[in-house]
Image (tube, rainbow, N blue to C red):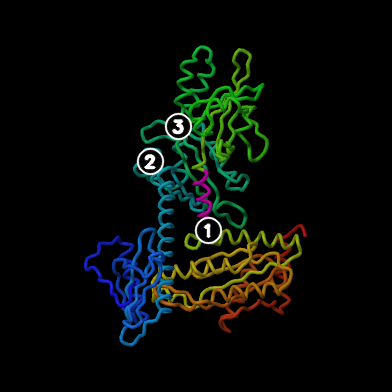
Amino acid sequence: MAHGTKPTPKHERSLPPDIASFERNAVELCSTFGLKGSFTDPAPTTDPTKPDQIGFDPQQQLGAVPLQFSPGQLLTLQVEPSSTTTLTLPILNGLQLSLQQQIKLLHDHQQVQQQAQRWHHALHNSFGVWDWQRPDDQLTCSEQWLNLLGMKSWDGKHLRDLFKRFDKNDRTAFTQDLRELIHGNIDMLDCESRLRHEDGHYIWLRNRGKVTDRDSKGQALRIVGTSVDIQQRKTGEEEVYDLCQQLQASETRYRELMKHASDAILITDLESKRIIDANHQATHLSGYTLKELFEKKHADLIHNPHGKCRCAEGGLHRNMTLVDKGGREHSIDIGCTIIDISGRQLLQCIIHDISEHKATEEYLHHMAHHDPLTGLPNRILFRDRLQQAIHKSQRNNTLVALCFFDLDNFKEINDSLGHDAGDQVLNTVAQRLTQAIRTSDTAARLGGDEFVTILEEIETPTIIQSIAGKILEQINRPITVANRQVQITSSLGISIYPTTSRNLDALISHADTAMYNAKQIGNCLEFFRLSCSPSQDAQENQENLNLCPDQ
């Protein structure tokens, strides 16, 4: 801004909602510092090569603060002091830094919302999602799941109601797999079944599900899964198989089917192991031309990430990997059929790309084990990590420390500044907590304003004191929310395995007790100390024996 030149604000400025909202917040921030702020169209700077340079006229007490809202979008905040305030360049610099940080947070929030919308669209429009609460047999299905079976609504509320729609030849297999999943004998339910459509005919669905919560005996309490329509693939497989049996007599028809099939198809000579035929979808999926595919062997493309590839034995092989020309790995299911053509053994492979389905399952699994606000592990994953840390401590003869804390007077922040401000405080605390601990440690949010950290592989208690002190120092730093600086305080409770606590539940309970002892002192960290009661020690020793029967 040229000295003595005051930009003329335009009376009518048509702005997008996000910019208009930001400008209102910026003007309010100026007023909290005793300044008058208004936005103008960008004015010329004293140095055109430095568009972010602040313009300041100390004599007229007038400042122009340029703000980069987005690439190619420059805003100019005109600043004047009130009658009781003197405007200085350091004040303008601090104002610019604070507002640019708000712009970054705004863009980050918009990106998170856009990503969540994309996942929601992919999840609820591409796959049918179902959620079964086993204790009361409550089954909840998404709208897309109902659409798969042509239903506008569903009166059934229990899994037993769903069983009535299964083809009788598939019901037993589904029930057996479900029972194995409930008891923990398999990691995932994955079966293909025919279910009755609302029109009366049956359609093939592939149903996949995972346990998201188990009871103390290891029995499933909740199973979340997806269903996808595989009728087209099943029909195609049946047609391809029938035509392959008549390959010599129906070459033209077979070629047409190969050409228009929705799944990739490879034909391999079992003797040479080389690919001798492929359809268009195979070239699209692999990235190779037909000529390049004919120079490849089956094993050059198809791999089993869990062991030896047994496609040459025929049958259906799930969760295989196809490596394309660019080196990218695709998750696939592959159905293999051995065909004898005039004494020549050929292997027909129908390849179904399940990469998108796998990505959705991984997202569901992540959401079931992580806090949706902060992204930290939730209570379910925290208990699993803590149990693993205890087992590792037993093997390596090291210590495990559990640090437990919540935020003092957090309810007042929610009540006075609103829940959005409270969420911002929780996110900031989560980020600081992650930065304060080592990569081998775990930070988790249990709910509300309760956080915990698991410190593993500890050789001496002095290390615990150092890390816990760093955590407390990071948490107690002020946080700027809603244009206000909020002072956060907390008290930290610590329990140590096996020094003070002999099992997982005792470790959690003792850390919680130590935290409340620390709160009585105020804004400090406190270690749990063993009770002098022999009966309590004896009880904990017995619990330790139950936890580790091999010791």
- What kind of residue is marked 3? Gln
Q: Nearer the viewer, residue 252 or 139?
A: 252
- Regarding mark 1 in the picture, which secondary structure is present there? loop
Crowdedness of circle 3 by 10 Å Cα count: few (<14), some, many (20+)? some
Magenta stretch, residue numbers: 358-370
At mark 3, the secondary structure is helix
Location of mark 3 (residue): 231
In which image quadrant can residue 341 be found? top right
Q: Looking at the image, is 72 positioned above or below residue 175?
A: below
Among numbered discs 3 and 1, the one appearing first in the sequence: 3
Taking the image as shown, residue 129 lies to the left or right of residue 505, namely left
Q: Which residue is mark 2?
A: 147
- Residue 331 is left or right of residue 145, and the answer is right
Asked if the stretch drawn in magenta spans residue 81, the answer is no
Expressed as whole percent of the image width and height from the top left, the position of residue 85 reads 35, 85
Estimate the spatial distance between the alpha carbons at disc 2 and disc 1, rounded to whole Å: 29 Å
Q: Nearer the viewer, residue 345 or 90?
A: 90
Q: Alpha-carbon distance for marks 3 and 1?
A: 34 Å
Give the residue at mark 1: 370
Q: Quadrant of the N terminus?
A: bottom left
In the image, what residue occupies the spot 62% across and 69% down? 508
* Mark toward the start of the polypeptide (2 vs 3): 2
Residue closest to the far left = 11
Taking 515 as reference, is 57 left or right? Answer: left
10 Å neighbourhood of mark 1: few (<14), some, or many (≥20)?
Answer: many
The kind of secondary structure the magenta stretch mainly shows is helix
Q: Position of residue 382 (x, y in %)?
A: 59, 61
Q: Are marks 2 and 3 in contact (CB under 8 Å)?
A: no
In the picture as drawn, the residue positioned furthest to the right comes out as: 551
Are the two marked residues, 3 and 1, in contact with CB atoms closer than 8 angstroms?
no
